[in-house]
Image: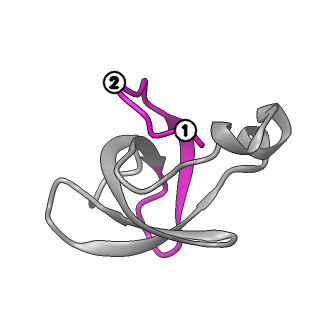
Amino acid sequence: MTTSEAVTARVIAVHKETSIVRGPDGVDRPAIVSGRFRFDALAPSDYPAVGDRVSVAHPQEPAVITAVLPRRSAFVR
């Protein structure tokens, strides 16, 4: 992830306010959700979960998650 354009990444871990994402280059990096994302989220299920594909901007560390791409399935309690 060397450009400032948004790229797709996979969430591989979530630790309270920080997620670990794996980009298309195969490198794991910490990521945080953007302020706009946090403001627009209506429920905890709107936040990234392990396995989600996300759009990541600003690939430097920490990366910034701008959107969760549509989920195909989910485990719900």
| Spot occupied by residue 57 in the image (x, y as percentages of width and height) | 48, 49
- Mark 1, other Cα within 10 Å: few <14 / some 14–19 / many ≥20: few
Count of all numbered marks drawn on residues in the image? 2
* Magenta span includes 17: no
Which amino acid is tagged 1? Val
The x, y position of residue 70, in whole percent, is 43, 23
Quadrant of the rendering where the C terminus is positioned: top right
Residue span colored magenta: 57-77
User: Residue at the spot x=54%, y=38% of the render?
Assistant: 76
Residue 5 percent coordinates (x, y): 39, 42
Mark 2 Cα-neighbour bin, 10 Å: few <14, some 14–19, many ≥20 = few
Check disc 1 and report the residue beneath it.
Answer: 76
Closer to the camera in the image, 36 or 20: 20
Q: Position of residue 67 (x, y in %)?
A: 54, 36
Q: Which mark is residue 72?
A: 2
* SS category of the residue bearing label 1: loop
